[in-house]
Each structure stands twice: as structure tokens, then as C-alpha cells.
Image (cartoon, coloured by chain):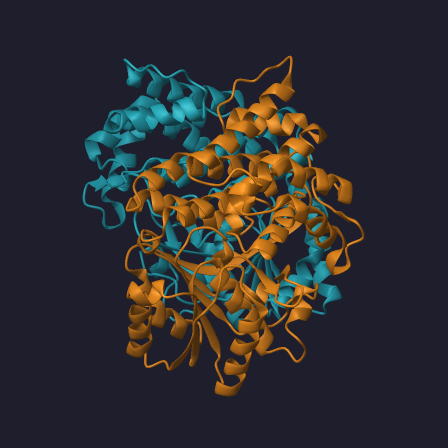
Chain colours: A cyan, B orange
Amino acid sequence: MDNFTFYSPTFFVFGRDTEKEAGSYVKKFGGTKVLIHYGGGSVVRSGLLDRVKASLDREAIPYLILGGVKPNPRSGLVYEGIDICRKEGVDFVLAVGGGSVIDSSKAIAAGTVYDGDFWDFYNGKYIEEALPVGTILTIAAAGSEGSPDSVITKEEGMFKRGATGNAIRPRFSILNPALTQTLPAFQTAAGITDIMAHLYERYLTNTTEVEVTDRLIEALLLTMIHEGPRVIEDPDHYEARANIMWAGMMAHNNAVGVGRSQDWNSHNIEHELSALYDCAHGAGLAVTMPAVFRYVMNHNVMRFAQVAVRVWGCQMDFAHPEVTALAGIEALRHFLKSIGMPGNFAELGAKEEDIPKLVEVLCRGDGRQGSISGFVTLTEEDCTKIYQMMV
Amino acid sequence: MDNFTFYSPTFFVFGRDTEKEAGSYVKKFGGTKVLIHYGGGSVVRSGLLDRVKASLDREAIPYLILGGVKPNPRSGLVYEGIDICRKEGVDFVLAVGGGSVIDSSKAIAAGTVYDGDFWDFYNGKYIEEALPVGTILTIAAAGSEGSPDSVITKEEGMFKRGATGNAIRPRFSILNPALTQTLPAFQTAAGITDIMAHLYERYLTNTTEVEVTDRLIEALLLTMIHEGPRVIEDPDHYEARANIMWAGMMAHNNAVGVGRSQDWNSHNIEHELSALYDCAHGAGLAVTMPAVFRYVMNHNVMRFAQVAVRVWGCQMDFAHPEVTALAGIEALRHFLKSIGMPGNFAELGAKEEDIPKLVEVLCRGDGRQGSISGFVTLTEEDCTKIYQMMV
């Protein structure tokens, strides 16, 4: 196990009706003027936005509102939010939505108190300071409610890049599983896939002797396998949604990923897909993961065999561990298909002829020198082959 | 799953040589005058205390020193610590040791800024304010390095009671697994048992639909079963110690226990043993747990069967689940014996004739009305039978 630090100071408020406490938590964490940031009309139609406003009114906390965050959130709206916060003296950003809304809120919070262009953070500058952020989560997926990370797409060039810093960890996150019951099945499944990807990215490590984090990651994968089909079958299943929601947070606040190298190449490879085609991140990951895993499997067959046996219930083939390893990858692929995720480029809306462009941006964009590093370092040739496996 | 809040803002610093950073973390968290609190001579002999002092010297942070914390820490030394902190204007308590030292430090930190008798907190008053506490952990066991809890024994009457409050959560905890390599095997095993007890106390719940926390608890139990024997076999096994140390923190900061009722009756029943005989808490738990579990097993046979199958690798007897449930309890008992823990009253140094006294204090002490509540409510008669099963 490697040396590490771990810090997750977010105050989590979990359960039914907890969004009504938003105002009191904003007050508790020092907010006196709030920007409520959200995405589309669903939080308006569901009445959630009104309940949040009412909770701020009860605490006599004034607020401004900025909606319109899209999946794969864009830099344009971030600049707009920064302008509002500066002009209006906002001192707290309250995200009401999923990972995209939270990531956009984090970018606004960091950008407001920074003299330069906020995109600097997405070019690798660590975020030291930001306005405090709170979240009211409406989809279990990105884990942004408990993470120090944010991913934004820059409109010029459609670069999708991440930034990080403890300053943008939410001060509080309100997690009411009932708020996720109105999600379309496809979005629920994409969220489940994203959570599983966060777990696999941590599982694929070159660090040895990491039994505790291996076991914890497996526990969360087993939870997704148990609860995923229940919630797809019955969208109103509060209990299944609750288990998924806590698993989604635990999958990404890094409590289960400490002290080990991680992969993140499935995310890297997928990011180019959702940047170019604007597909759901989870859907892109469903197509990407099995291809990446088959491609890198021989780098550590026993690791893939371990997850196959412990998580997918495969029988260990002691004479041919690679058979077991592959069976685990196939079990993942079938699971993702069973919950309604796409399985190839066509189902995702991606095009084979774009592969050279995808590889170019992936391996040469943003200062990269012809490869991406992770569990296995992947060259342009490797990435080309992986994208071709997805066709 | 029940509604809950979860808050674990401790900054964890994990790995080799990390104790040398103690001074910089005290500074980071605002300490300007420190009480270093520790137990016996081992931290002196090992040179750990000198390294900690040197790290404070490097930051020019003055300190006072108070040693002498005993296992099952006593109220007398807490009063002494409070006096020192008040007289000397100490504003940070740095615990160098195990759970007893940390718990004593937390009591001092809370008592220093409280007008009344610090024992009020151990009679049920929530701790709202305290000096900041930091820890340098020397044994993986109590989980106090990441918890809001403290257990102290009051010398008059030998009452052993707990207090809680987010104010006494450590601001930082330094976890260097190498520091635990010099522990005697018995203490290492007692620590392992304590960690497993923290997991079982959370596992035994009357809340349904808690798959995610079930799976996480099982993951940590599996880790202990894998790493425990390795570290007993080879005390210098850094990697096994590292896995146990992170599992010990995760077992008790409650990330794996949220949203569910918990038991804690094994702890309640054990506390009277270590209060009366001054035995190691973990050793007491090794004798207590199997007896309690056999006694309450029929309250929810399937829960005990589940842990037997998922954690202990027992075959499920679908016609007779109670057979599987019992096999799991037996597997736990054998495991604890295999790592050197006592199995009965005699091996623990407890006496059958004291049972009436133990039950009296347990069920009538400290305002209790003749029973203790948890997974199953246990009357004086129940507790008498359970203690008799341990003879």
C-alpha cells in the first residue's frame, strides 16, 4: 500500500424530505447570499426548486437563480455564473441537480474568487480557493457530491477536462433517494454504469497488497449488481435507490481508493466520445469499459480473475485464469446491456470514421505526448485498436 | 434504510514516516501550544515521542507532556490533564498512542473548555465544544482516530461509560502502520478483535434493505480474516498491518454503519468485564461476542446465516439455516482463538461468582432500568445467562 492522505469533510444529509433542510445547512456553513444553479426543467416541474427556495426563504437567505446546465457542462455557462456571483456578491453556490450541475457549480465557485481564467484549473492548476458549495443531488452517478473534482467541456475545441482541489469539495450534500425516482430508466442505468466505472478505475491498480480497498470496491460493485436490476424493474423502489445513492458517494470520495495507483483510462477514452457526440457519460462508459478491459487484461490476468470470482460469481479456472478473467468482463458487459446500456458505437451514435480524430484529441490534446497513462500506458495505436473494438 | 447524517472531517495522513509531519499538521489546524498525551514507556523507548517533539520543535510550537494513560483510561488523569491545559493555556491536544490515549485526550479536550465536571459528558451530555485534538496512532483497534467517541472509566465505582460529539473528532490522525510492528502479539490480536466487534455491532441491525452497508461491513471483516493471521505470524508485516489499520478506521468512523440500527450489546456486556478485571477490551470482546451471538441468533437467523456464508465461507444449509448461522459463530470463535484470544472466563481472569455484580452494574448502573437495548433487548436474566455461557 502506498502512503496517502484522505480528507472528506463533506457533511452528508441522507434520506427522505432532507431537501427541505437546505436553507438551514446553507446558514450553518456561512452562506448569506446564494446562487442556486440547476439544469433543465425537471427540478422546476417536480417542485424541487420551489421547496429549495422555500427553505432559503425560511432562513431569510436571499438568492439568485441560474439554470440551463447541460449534460457534459460547458464553459460558457460557467463564465456567466462567475459574472453573476461577482456582480451580486454571492458567497455560496447551491447545486440542485446531478454531476453536471455540481461540476458547473464547483467551476463557478472556484472561478469567482480567482483573478485569471477559470479554465486554468482545467489545464492542471490546483484549486486552492473557492466559494463554499452545497449540493442537493438528483441522480446517483458522478459522485461529485463527495469529491474534490469537476469536469467541464470547453466550447472552443470541445475539450473535456477535469480540475481538482479540496476547496471545491461540497460543504454539505443532501441526498434524498426519492428525488431520483422520477429519472428516466436510461439515465438511472447510465448513473449505475458511471458508479461501476469509478469502482473499476480504482480496482485496476499496479499497487500490491491492497486487500482492504479491493474488498471495499468489490462490496460496492456487489451492491450495484444487486440493486441495479431492482431499480430498473421498479423505478419507485426507494430502498434500492438509497443503497445505490450511498454506494455512488462511497465509490468516488476515494475512501475505497486510497493508497493505490488507479487507472482512469476508460474515463479518458470515454471523455472524447461524450465531448464529440454529447452522449451520456455513463452510456459511453458502458461501451468503453469492456473493450478497454479486454485490451489490457493480460497486463494482470489474476486481477481480472479476482473480480470475476469475487464480484461476478464466476468459477475460477485454475488451469486457465484468463478464461475466468474474460468471463468476468463478459459478465460486466451482459449486466450493462441488461440494464439498457448501449453495447457499441452504433448504439451510442458514434462513428467509425471519427476514430482518427478521437485518438488525436485523446493522445495529443491538452499537452499529451502521444499516449495516456494508467493501469497500462496506451499509445495512439492502442487507443485506435480499443475504439475499433467498440465498433 | 433510515435517514441519517454522516460527517467525518478528520484529515488522515497514512504511511511510513508520517509521524514526522505531526508538527506541521498541528500548525495547519491552528495549534500554538500543545499537550502531548501518551501512555506507557513504549513510545519513549521506541523513540516515537522524540520524533514527535522534534517535529513540534521544527515548527517552533511549545508543548507540555502528560504520560501515564492506562488501558481502560481513568478519570483521574483526565482531571489532571484539564488542569494543565487550563493553567498553561494549551490550545491543542496531541494524542500519541492507542484508543485509550486518544479517548483520554478527547476527554481532556472537552473538559478544558467546559465549566462543569467533564463526567457530565459521560452521563449523556453531547459534547458541543472542545480543544482541537490530533492523533498519532500506535495500535489498530479502537477506531478512536476517526470517531466522535470516547470511553472513560470513573474511578469511584469503576463505571466505564462513553461520550460523543463531533467537536472531539480528531482534526488530523497520523496512521503509520510501522509504528504498530513493535506491539506484542496479544495486543495486536486484541486490536483485531476490537475492530471485528465494531463491525459485528453494526452488522446486527433490525433495519432492512441495507445491502450497501452489509457489503461494506463484510468487506472489512474479510480483510481482517485475511490479514489477521498474516500479522500474527509475522509481526513485521508492514502491508498486513497497513490493511488492518485502514480497516480499523473504516470500521468505526461509521461510513459503513449509516442508516441502520446497531447493536452494541457485546460492547456493553464486555465493558463491565474490563472495568472490573482491567482486562484488554479486545480480549473481553473475544469471550463476549460468541456467547452473545449464540444467545440472540434466533432473533434473525438469516442475518447470521448471511455473514456465515458471505464472510466465513460456510455452505448455506437451505433446509436448516440455523445450522449455517451457528457455523458462522463457531468460525468466528475459532478464528479468535487461532490469533491467541481467550475463549472463556478463566482465560480472561473473570470469576463466575462475580456474575450477579456484573449484571447489577450492567443493567442497573448509570440510570438503566433493568435491561440493555440493542439488536435484542436483554434483561438481567438474559445477561446472567450470557455471562454464564462464557464460563
Q: Nearer the viewer, residue B386 or B144?
A: B386
Residue A127 location in percent, x, y? 39, 62
Q: Can residue A124 be seen here? A: yes
Q: Is residue B145 above or below residue B285?
A: below
Q: Is residue B341 above or below residue B116?
A: above
Residue A375 location in percent, x, y? 28, 37
Q: Nearer the viewer, residue B321 or A72?
A: B321
User: Which residue reaches farthest right?
Assistant: B369
Left or right relative to B68: residue A319: left
User: Which residue reaches farthest bottom?
Assistant: B87
Q: Which of A314 and A210 is in front in this view?
A: A210
Q: Which residue is drawn at 48% across and 63% down?
A: B70
Q: Which residue is drawn at 72% across and 67% down?
A: A59
User: Which residue reaches farthest front?
Assistant: B353
Left or right relative to B335: residue B385: right
Q: Residue at x 48, y 79 (%)?
A: B91
Where, quadrant-wise, is the C terminus of chain B in this rendering?
A: top right
Q: Residue at x 58, y 21 (%)?
A: B324
